[in-house]
Amino acid sequence: MEKLLEVKDLKVSFQTFFGEVEAVRGVSFHVNKGETVALVGESGCGKSVTASSIMQLLPMPPAFYKDGQILFNGEDIVKKTEKEMQSIRGSQIAMIFQDPMTSLNPTMKVGKQIVEGLIKHNKLTKAQAEKRAIDMLELVSVPQPEKRISQYPHEFSGGMRQRVMIALAMVSNPQLLIADEPTTALDVTVQAQILDLMKSIQNKLDTSIILITHDLGVVADISDRVIVMYAGQLLEEGTVDEIFKNPGHPYTRKLLGSVPRLDMDRLKSLHSIEGTPPDLYIPPKGCPFFDRCDEAMVICKDHMPDREYHTNSHYSCCWLNHPMAQSAVEGSEA
């Protein structure tokens, strides 16, 4: 498959009063055309910073690119000026933010917020842009779009505001959609409707999606590949089936173990991951999950393992998967 986006050894930090916070530490991944890739992990692991870096939405300062490349259609986004990025945002790369109420301008009618991007990026007349906005609202299943286009965000329910956000993001047919917790604070029924809507639009427009979420149920429903992130680094990557059926990193196994399942004993408590993520003012030398891992070895503390591939599409960064680890276990048992 053809790569649309390729992130290579990305390092992003924040300069604070107390020192440098290394929020993203050597992240590398790619997104193919028409593919959905989920980026999962605990809060504060660097998911949203990585996504914002792709669109150059981080305030600089205090944020700064320390190293790496972000190749979109072969061009390095990191090197582009703000003026160049303005022509990319919305038209080629779009983003759905976590909270539609704070992302939509409460003082502007919904239609105007959609129309202004169309006029800027697609050089349409106001009448053409309004017709396109109505068609897009209809596509995302907003009832009576001709009427709702003249209403303010507060006149929409939470689920409808999220539909408007999707319409706003997709109206210029971007090649890449970044969805940052698109179903947060929505009830389960609306959540399912939003996911079905995203899949439907993706099929119609052949859009690539980066899905940022904590919800592994959402991941299983909509994603092709899964990337597990922790403390600013990638610990595992694979297809949905590979990650859910054969997780290779202890952190991934603990994440999956904390998710309720229909076949679980209702009296059995869910597993929790004890401890807290490391302080990225002083990032660990070795595996960042060392302090919370039940299977940690001495080498894990001071040396970060390389990627060990289980299949061509599935790798994990864990010393337990190193070829010499199994022989050491067998030798100790003997």
Image (tube, grey):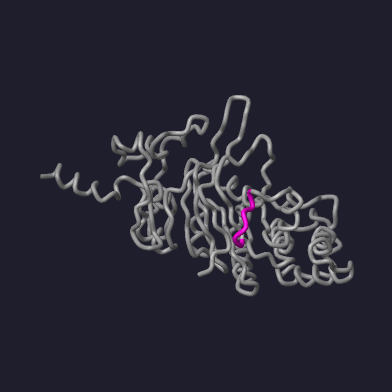
Between 314 and 277, which is closer to the camera in this rendering? 314
- Looking at the image, residue 90 sits to the left or right of residue 2; the answer is right
Please provide percent x and percent y for residue 49: 60, 45
Is residue 77 rendered magenta in the image?
A: yes
Residue visible at 31% across and 39% down?
296
Q: Which residues are magenta?
A: 73-78
Closer to the camera in the image, 118 or 131: 118
Quadrant occupied by the C terminus: top left
Q: Is residue 29 left or right of residue 82?
A: left
In the displayed structure, does residue 37 sit left or right of residue 76?
left
Q: How many marks?
A: 0
Looking at the image, residue 98 lies above or below residue 22: below
Q: Residue at x 82, y 61 (%)?
A: 120
Name the foreground residue: 138 vs 232.
Answer: 232
Q: Position of residue 17 (x, y in %)?
A: 63, 25
Residue 87: percent from left, percent from top: 75, 57
In this view, the residue farthest toward the bottom is: 204
Q: Is residue 268 visible?
A: no
Q: Position of residue 209 (x, y in %)?
A: 59, 62
- Image quadrant assignment for residue 291: top left
Residue at image point 14% right, 44% down? 331
Reply yes or no: does residue 52 show up in magenta. no
Placement of 256 over or under 65, stated as above or below: below
